[in-house]
Amino acid sequence: MPQRVAVVVETSGSSGPPKRVALSTAALLTSASATLAELGGPGRWLLCLPTHYVAGLQVLVRSLTAEADPVVLPAGGFDAAAFLALARTMPARERRYSSLVPVQLARLLDLAERDPAAAEALRSFDALLIGGQATPQPLRDRAAALGARIRLTYGSSETSGGCVYDGVPLHDVRMRVENGQVLLGGPTLAEGYLDADGAIDHERSAAAFLEIDGERWYRTGDAGSIVDGRLRVTGRLDRVIVSGGEKVSLDSVEAVLREGTVPDAVVVRRADEQWGEVPVVVTAEEAPALTDLRALIADRLGRAAAPAAVLPVGRIPLLASGKPDRRALEVLAEQA
């Protein structure tokens, strides 16, 4: 293993094969310091994410940087009541932070909306970092209504975690869009990917990292735009299908549904003899009739984007990172 590598993080593989990302001490500490500066200074963290993923790992690194041991939520599934009970034990005079995925935030809001004491505990955090996947607007609105201070983060294992907060890059982080793809640069970038022997996998790394005018950049695989210095991510480039000759962004379909019609919707692809591929909606909640969903999506995104089916499930399968297991759901959609 190269000497500069301090930690190896395996990506969750929510939409593709996992990769072993090699991170240096310098990259991790630079990211942690930039985060604490952005949030207003060191504080005490409540850890509720797996530490073998970069979001949980960074809670540990930020805690080391702040010289403040984190408060740790016991493993075994996220419990909103236990999270807020631990929050009440944190020192009152210290700044409080936590890092969550959207589904965890939703569970906290569910509890806080019916329990004033829980709402007060949630408001006690100086910042709740929300990342890992897109945060639906209704969820943001609910957090704002309760006075919860959330920050929407964007990044990946390859950038030592979140490096763009509310669309604005952290100190020394650079961003640009080339051919519709978001590129990220700066001192928080990974060394590359490791192969099975622990050496840098140059071929795989070269596919993700590139140099432009002497600066190193990471190809995120996300579509987006930058307007007035603020990044807007619109979805994964590999989450686009061609249905009846038209390109359809599955992330765009999902975003429309999550605005309120089907809050937990996960939209996956399914092969279709007539159209090539079609969107399928997977949900664990009671959804409107398929005809209503098709009309909604057709009106917003065009007829080609209208879902071909709604697949009800007992629960949405999640990876340890808290992201939906899209590959498992695609298998279910093909079998349905």
Image (tube, rainbow, N blue to C red):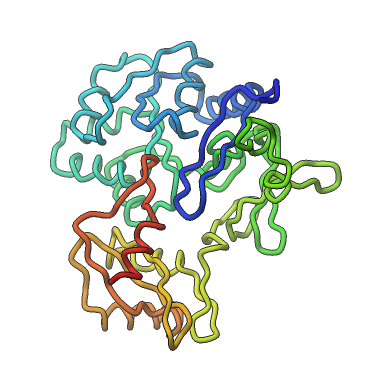
Quarter placement of the N terminus: top right
Q: Nearer the viewer, residue 161 or 33?
A: 161
Quarter of the image where one finds residue 89 = top left
Residue at (43, 37) in percent of width and height: 129
Outermost residue on the bottom side: it is 274
> Residue 99 placed where, x, y %?
40, 33
In this rendering, position of residue 152 left or right of residue 35 = left
> Residue 28 placed where, x, y %?
59, 26
Q: Nearer the viewer, residue 80 or 156?
A: 156
Is residue 96 depicted above or below 64 in this figure? below
Is residue 306 depicted above or below 193 in this figure? below
Residue at (71, 64) in percent of width and height: 179
Quarter of the image where one finds residue 221 = bottom right
Q: Nearer the viewer, residue 212 or 121?
A: 212
> Residue 189 placed where, x, y %?
66, 36
Is residue 318 depicted above or below 37 in this figure? below
